[in-house]
Image: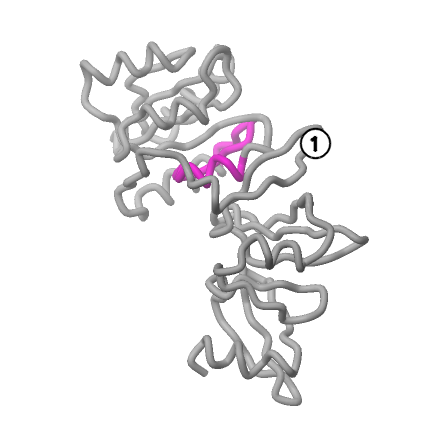
Amino acid sequence: MVFMKALIIDDEPLARQRLRRLLNELDVEVVGEFADGPDALAWFKEHNEPDVCFLDIQMPGASGLEIIAELPHTLNVVFVTAFDQHAVNAFDLEASDYLLKPVSKDRLARCLDRLQTLPPPKRKEQALSIGSRYPVKVGNGYVFIDLKRTTHFEVEEESVWAWVQLGPDGHQRFRTLWDTLAQVETRFIHEGLIRIQRHLLLRTQAILGARTLEGGRLSVRVAEGVELEVSRSVTPQIKEICGL
């Protein structure tokens, strides 16, 4: 029984074939396949919106990161690519999920299960505000991260690293272009960043939970399995913010 309809946009025929086969095995009907964005966008003018669009990122002409802005804003979009450095931008563009090639059947099944639990997407018509983003180094280039996906910054080896939440499956560290946490504080002076230790700068909106340690200090949880210890002097301030 078909329980979901999908569209595939990918310039690689073998990748489309593999994904179509896996989707069919999971009772998903593929209602259209396209090698580029323009043909896919034309398809939407004459057909009903599917449940999900599986979109490659690196394609000739317009990339998937550009095409998503032209797709219906209520459509679930799942990026499928061989390059994990695009994950940050993909989630900043409010993609529903992000799959790495070659896609496994198990990971695809988890993606489909997750789509059924998500509220209907309502992506913004415009990209993120540049004012809330900052560049990080990825390979030989840079990607831009939105501050709202950052849990905290830390200093290590005379560099500032940003810890970023990449959807439900990942909490990853990226090297920024800053040398000191003071530079980060100056850049985002009104964004709720608090120095909880000399080498740690916490975005307070990222706090998911907290617990008291020996001596009255606090430990805050910012991601699954990730806790940060708060210094004794800053603990009262964090407790007040958390209403503890």
Quadrant in the picture for residue 194? bottom right
* 91 to 156, vertically: above or below: above
Q: Tell me what residue is drawn at x 28 percent, y 47 percent.
A: 119
- Image spot of residue 58 (x, y percent): 53, 20
- What residue is shown with label 1? 139
Q: Camera-side residue: 177 or 65? A: 177
Q: Is residue 98 magenta?
A: yes
Q: Give the range drawn in magenta.
A: 87-106
- Image spot of residue 41 (x, y percent): 30, 16
- Image spot of residue 94 (x, y percent): 39, 39
Quadrant where the C terminus sits is bottom left
- Name which residue type carries label 1: Gly
Q: Is residue 196 left or right of residue 25?
A: right
Q: Tell me what residue is drawn at x 63 percent, y 33 percent.
A: 142
Most extreme residue toward the right, as rendered?
Answer: 157
Quadrant where the N terminus sits is top left
Q: In what element is the residue under mark 1?
A: loop
Most extreme residue toward the bottom, as rendered?
Answer: 215
Q: Is residue 175 left or right of residue 87?
A: right
Q: Tell me what residue is drawn at x 57 percent, y 50 percent.
A: 164
Q: Camera-side residue: 184 or 136? A: 184
Quadrant in the picture for residue 127? top left
Quadrant in the picture for residue 221? bottom right
* 243 to 222, vertically: above or below: below
- Image spot of residue 102 (x, y percent): 56, 26
Q: Tell me what residue is drawn at x 53 percent, y 79 percent.
A: 237
Q: Is residue 15 magenta?
A: no
